[in-house]
Amino acid sequence: MADNETTKSNFIHNFIDEDLASGRYTEVYTRFPPEPNGYLHIGHAKSICLNFGTAQKYGGRCNLRYDDTNPVKEDTEYVDSIEEDIRWLGFKWDKQLWASGYFDKMYEAAISLIEQGKAFVCDLTADEIREYRGTLTEPGKESPYRNRSVEENLTLFQEMKEGKYKDGEKVLRAKIDMASPNINMRDPVIYRIAHATHHNTGDKWCIYPMYDFAHPIEDAIEGITHSICTLEFEDHRPLYDWVLNELGWWDPQPRQIEFARLNVTDTVMSKRFLKKMVDDGIVDGWDDPRMPTIAGLRRRGYTPESIRDFCERIGVAKANSTVDAALLDYCVREDLKSKVESRNVVFDPIKVVITNYPEDMTEEMEMENNREREDLGSRMVPFSRELLVDGEDFMEVPVKKYFRLFPGNEVRFKGAYFITCNEVIKNEDGSIKELHCTYDPETRSGSGFEGRKVKGTIHWVDAKTAVPVTVRDYKSLMMTDENGESVQRPDSVVTRTAYAEPLVKEAKPGERYQFFRHGYYIADSKLCTEDEKVFNRIVDLKSSFKIK
Ligand code: ATP
Ligand code: MG
């Protein structure tokens, strides 16, 4: 485990340290509570790293709990993807649970509040409730149904459960304080009627608990100690505590702690938005390599280590901010540079003919696989009279400080010989047909030649044996336009053909390489086959991004 993977301390851990020291809790138990209505995205990764990572740090446990208190159809595709993504990120849950498994207990809790005179059935419409709620500067007005007797409330709630009323006709509300400065405490709705089939409980229920009522109960039932959530819920914490205090069923009670949600530049992270991109066919599924979903990042080639490192580096804050997407690129580069093997791949090829090299000769040149990792060994790469070099490694009229190939210049062909460009042969239309060059046999790589130095080193592939590969370069799906609006980028994927050394024929889906001097690439998990090699660019080699 790298240094940066050992969980850094943060304000949440400080709270936990206090709670353990004071004896409020004797263990740490967290949960990750996704709603199974889409694939997880990089924001969820942050929450996963925090919840599972915190449990790990304290030798505690973390549950995976599906938040399925809304009666929508279950989509096993989403459930399967959530589990795959958490495992891929490197975490294990203690228990896998469904919030709907607690409906009986929640109903019991509602009855208990009614019996204590702490909840009432209200007949106001949704609009009226909103009207009565007041504003930040004005107190709310009490519902005319607020003073119903316990008996009447019990009967009405029972009838709500039995299906006697239509959706929206009645709700159950907590009786707290319509003058509270916190609007969430102004008699919030805790149960609503919804005649809908639930994937888990079928038609057993036609009343469903609201999130603010359900969540503390779910946490308490599981014995969660620290319920970590995003900042929007800070103002809901008094209600979270109210529910548990009024019930008084659990000791110790869980503690809700909020942190700022992750935002990333040019990245929209709402499942609803991402689902629309999928449904509208703007992307090629939830795992499109441009998607900020964990499945998309995985297919794009990001590693679990790089995502965990990213989440660790951004830390846990109490104030919302936006993280530069370039930080994630930095993390994956850091991770891959000492892991993957290098391959020679040429883009926009220019043919080079070594006029003084024997026609039928091929030499096998030894190339190291990773400069930082001798243990990754080396490979043999064929070299012969006709080669391909990168379009950007030749300039007919060189600019200042250009040390690569140009007429009259000598460069090192990496792992091979010093080669001098003598003549540019053109097609009829004036485009370059090939470069006529000569090599100096004395300068073979590894021969210890020290006669003279050259400034430029370029890579190459053997023309005869080169393998054409499809490479897909990506940019973010969204961008900020001149008016500061977030809009879709027209060129978020650019597909090109490149030419690779023969070994690339053996690349298997999911294998990552550095394409020498170009970037890190992964053989696409779906499109890369025996016959067609398709690579996704994970990230280029360098960026202007500077880590602070
Ligand atoms: P979305 O709006 O993208 O659908 P959500 O919050 O509705 O997100 P849930 O499935 O309810 O998605 O979230 C599961 C957990 O992940 C919650 O605890 C939530 O706070 C957390 N989470 C979601 N998005 C982020 C984010 N951008 N940064 C940090 N945590 C997040
Ligand atoms: Mg949600």
Image (spheres, rainbow, N blue to C red):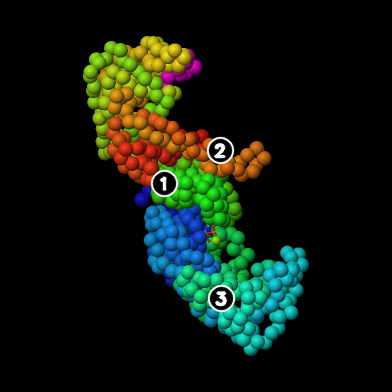
Would you call the spot at circle 3 few (<14 residues within 10 Å), some (14-19), or many (20 or more)?
A: many
Report the mark closest to the observer, 3 or 1. 3
Left or right: 307, with 361 as reference point: right
- Whole-Å distance between the Cαs marked 1 and 2? 21 Å
Where in the figure is residue 13, as x and y percent of width and height?
A: 49, 60
Question: Element under label 3?
Answer: loop
Q: Which residue is mark 2?
A: 490
Which residue appears at 35% of the width and 37% of the height? 533
Which residue appears at 51% of the width and 47% of the height? 281
Would you call the spot at circle 2 few (<14 residues within 10 Å), some (14-19), or many (20 or more)?
A: few
Bounds of the magenta span?
Answer: 393-404
Where in the figure is residue 255, as x and y percent of width and height?
A: 53, 69
Identify the mark nearer the N-term, 3 or 1.
3
Which residue appears at 54% of the width and 68% of the height? 70
Q: Nearer the viewer, residue 164 or 294?
A: 164
Amino acid type, label 2: Pro
Does the beta carbon at disc 3 come under 8 Å from ligand 2?
no
Identify the mark nearer the N-term, 1 or 2.
1
Q: Quadrant of residue 359?
A: top left
CB under 8 Å between callouts 2 and 3? no
Where in the figure is residue 64, as x and y percent of width and height?
A: 44, 64
Q: Nearer the viewer, residue 200 or 302?
A: 200
Identify the mark nearer the N-term, 2 or 3.
3
Does the magenta stretch mainly form a helix, a strand or a loop?
loop
Which residue appears at 57% of the width and 75% of the height? 207
Q: Which residue is mark 1?
A: 299
- Whole-Å distance between the Cαs marked 3 and 1? 41 Å
Left or right: 6, with 265 as reference point: left
